[in-house]
Amino acid sequence: MYITQGLKRAVQVNRRGIATIDGERQRTWGTFVERVAKFAGALKKLGLRPQGRVAILSLNSDYYLECFFAIAWAGGIVVPLNIRLAMPELVYMLNDAGVQILVVDETHKDKLPELLPQSNSIQHVILTGEGTLPDDALRYEDILMDAAPLPDVGYGGDDVVGIFYTGGTTGLSKGVMLSHTNLISNAITVLLNIYEGEPWVYLHSAPMFHIADAQWMVGVTMQAGTHVFMPKFIPEEMLKNIQKYKVTHCALVPTMVNMLLNLSNRDQYDVSTLRGMNYGGSPMAPALISRARQAFPKCRLFQGYGQTETSPNVSMLVDKFHDPAYASKFESAGQPMLTVEVRIVDEDDHELPIGEVGEIVVRGPNIMKGYWNKPEETAHALRGGWMHTGDIGFMDEDGFLYIVDRLKDVIISGGENVYSVEVEAALYQHPAVAVCAVIGIPDAKWGESVHAIVVLRDGESITAETLIEHCRTRIAGYKCPRSIEIRHEPLPMSGAGKILKRELRAPYWAGMSRAVN
């Protein structure tokens, strides 16, 4: 299996069909594959090596999709960059991955003067926009037009096709190496649950740098559907796009769904074409499901659970189980995907009986090859041949998976993973901070919000607002604490001197069936 296989099929069965819609710009599958082959040729001409890394720093666009497939066509590895990251985080990822070529859009080209001097590997910068060309940058359309089409290099199977960075438990992000087989097997198993046999008109409203959207770059292409792009999620713009382009499918996090439903003028848009909505990051409350059913009456709902390391889907709660008749399943993450094995294990990796709580471990063709340049962390995560997710849960007698807590110190806020240790590392860089702990607390809008509990050094005085601003200079805004409690007494500790975060979280989650969202 190889990523460009689905693209070649799309051209074979739907050459004259519309592949991409980006504003007023539309391209057929025949044109799309020609551009992919030529941009692959341009990358090769610039010196891209086999398995060389090309990073993309961009909002959603048709260029993004072209780059994704062209990099695979040329035998390279794509490194999608989260556009919300702070400069130190971007620099770390570029250097860690040894990125050779950086593709950037108009919105983010202003970062280049600060970014490039700190890079130790970037040789070329390519601008996708039509604006002023930065010094020493190349224009996407110019190099594409000047290049000869490159025959598909033919990489596939276990060859790495993407490095997707996720938060690290050591404070440094980890590059998750995903292969062609990983991404294709995930797309196929998802489509087996959702695909009705008629090609989709899919709206890329969630960020394309995220693995949750990468699966649709692959899956929609495999079915020769149509990709519609909006640069970023804006609730009313999304409804306009659904109406204008007769969108049939989309993927969102519950926070986005709630924003759509809260639009006062939502009813003025025709959304009757929408047939499927995939959501993840956290479950949707029954009340929100009911409202979504009313707002999108022909739309089926699917909840996906997984993580970057699993490409991403582990399990899915299909539309049937969103019905009130199956209310007992609402809080589950659904049943395992086809080809994916799921177990609940104890601390010694022994499988636990039905209903008992333990760590969720996963095995299948969707599991990552490992963490880039981190063999010890790879060995630990994949010990015994199973991916240890760091999530705590149980399975019922029908094979439904329930998430109750997290072993890994991660908070999911608005669909984004925030690793507590990254936030704590930023806080500890302030000289006034003696001890801190970062936890996730319930939030009606975001599912969870980042909350910090800080003990100051003797004689120090500082406001929560000042500490939050301090964090903003070091980590992405979405990772920064939304609230900070400054305490004057020691934080609870275990006998081994470890801060007991479960005790800190307990008052916020009291009365709830699960300690995470």
Image: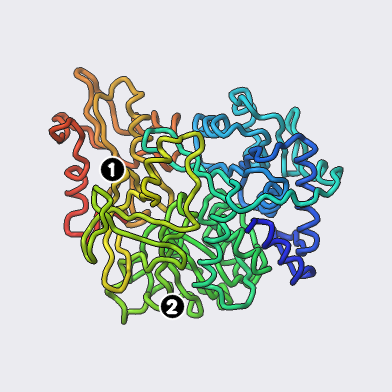
User: Looking at numbered disc 1 in the image, what kind of residue is underneath it?
Assistant: Ile
Residue 63 visible somewhere in the drawing:
no
Which quadrant: the C terminus? bottom left
Return the residue at label 1: 439
Nearest to the eye among marks 1 and 2: give it: 1
- Residue at image mark 2: 294
For the N terminus, the quadrant is bottom right
| Residue 355 location (% of width, % of height) | 22, 65
Neighbour tally class for label 1: few under 14, some 14-19, many 20 plus, Cα within 10 Å = many
User: Which percent across, then down, holds residue 236?
Assistant: 54, 62
Q: Is residue 491 left or right of residue 176?
A: left
Residue plotted at (31% across, 20% down): 431
Foreground of the two, 433 or 467: 433
Labels 1 & 2 near each other (Cβ < 8 A): no
Whether residue 499 can be seen here: yes
| Residue at the limit of the structure toward the front, as seen here | 384
Q: Which badge, 1 or 2, comes first in the chain's sequence? A: 2
Helix, strand or loop at disc 1? strand
Residue 221 position, x and y percent, is 65, 63
Residue 99 drawn above or below residue 354: above
Please, is residue 119 above or below residue 231 in the view?
above
Q: Residues within 10 Å of mark 2 (few under 14, many from 20)?
A: few
Find residue 367 and report its horizontal and vertical position in percent.
47, 53
| Residue 183 image label | none
Q: What scheme was used to colour the molecule? A: rainbow
Q: Nearer the viewer, residue 126 or 155?
A: 155
The residue at 36%/24% (across/down) is 429
Question: What residue type is disc 2 on?
Answer: Gln
Image side of residue 66 versus residue 141, left or right: left
Secondary structure under tag 2 reads: helix
In this view, 493 is above or below 24: above
Q: CA distance from mark 1 to mark 2?
A: 35 Å
